[in-house]
Amino acid sequence: MRRTAATTPAPSCASTFETRVDGARVAFSGGLGLNTLGAAQASLRGSAIRTLDVSKLDALDTPGALLLCEWRRGGGQLTGVRADHKPLLALIEELDLQPLPAVKKPARWYQLIVQLGRGADMLWRDMIELITLFGRVSRAARHALLHPRKLRPAAISRHVVETGVNAMPIIALMAAMIGIVIGYQGVAQLRSYGGEDFTINLVAVSVLREMGVLITAILAAGRSGSAFTAEIGVMKARAEVDALQVMGLEPLELLVLPRLIALVITLPLLTFFADLMGLFGGGVIALTLLNVEPLQYLDRVRQALDVSDLMVGLAKAPVFAFFIGLIGCMHGLRVRGSAESVGSETTHAVVKAIFVVIVFDALFSVLFERLGW
């Protein structure tokens, strides 16, 4: 006949812990462990305390035993140690407890080199991933063009409304403010030379060639690019993208391609709208500071501008739109299942999209000047 030994569960160190101070003597009762270590340390901080009574301790774990042994090494006296606690205390006493060595802080020049190397590696990986996604999107676009039903016009129209129509108020406000600022500063700087009339030329050329498309692209990066990253990122965190793949659907055709097509359509239109609002802001300055009537202002704008000035700004817009959407979708697909990852990737998408827009704008400026446009 086999007998089964009954085991009695050890008392938990999370039980009630009490301290009683009587002059130079302290008594612990209850459970001394990790959860009650703070209260025990607070009761032993008095310099006059010399004796610690642990006869009423019901439970003791390793952190509590470390505290008692440290107290004993510091000259304190333990009394009433229970027999079932002595092996643990003896084991702790035999340990050669040494403080952890201080971590040597690397030199600043070494930290700088590490950060530069890490940044270069991240930049290289981003470029490779962006080129890879560009190829995949190009293949998906070719497949969709060969099979027009794959274009999903309903999704494209919805994103056109979200990225274009809903963005018109903020685009109008920002473009008009930019026109007013350029016009005001132009009048303030040129008046001392007697050339304030050329402010109209300054506003017209700068808005159509540079500021209109640049402000529109930056706002699109902060508004639409971040929305692309957040939407796709949340779907990735909820495993909805994986579910699409399991169902045999291509996420690029469903999620990425409609957003890219919509943004490529809307950004040139928003750029043209921003150009008009920027010229409107310049007209307000011309009317208030230069006393130029609206018809005279329009005639001066017509004389100052050429068709190439308008086309230069509009030619940049589709390129900016494509890379803004591509970067936003790329970071959305990078999300790894947490809210922190969604926020981090959204921030990175906006920063990188704005950086790419400014870099491409500088390259376009050099290119168009070399071409004489």
Image (cartoon, rainbow, N blue to C red):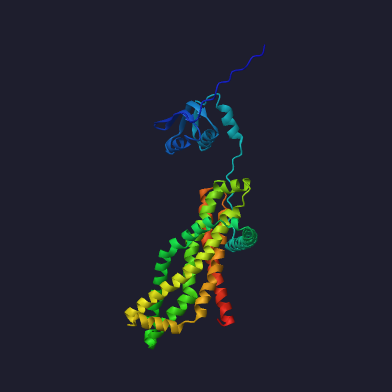
Q: Along the horizontal axis of the image, is 15 left or right of 257?
A: left
Q: Position of residue 4 (x, y in %)?
A: 63, 16
**Residue 304 drawn above or below residue 129:** below
Q: Position of residue 338 (x, y in %)?
A: 53, 48
Q: Along the horizontal axis of the image, is 295 left or right of 331?
A: left
Q: Residue at x 54, y 25 (%)?
A: 10
Q: Position of residue 141 (x, y in %)?
A: 62, 60
Corner quadrant of residue 187: bottom left
Can residue 337 be seen here? The reply is no
**Residue 25 drawn above or below residue 236:** above
> Which of the pair 98/265 is nearer the observer?
265
Q: Position of residue 320 (x, y in %)?
A: 54, 67
Q: Residue furthest top?
A: 1
Q: Residue at x 49, y 60 (%)?
A: 160
Corner quadrant of residue 328: bottom right
**Residue 202 drawn above or below residue 158:** below
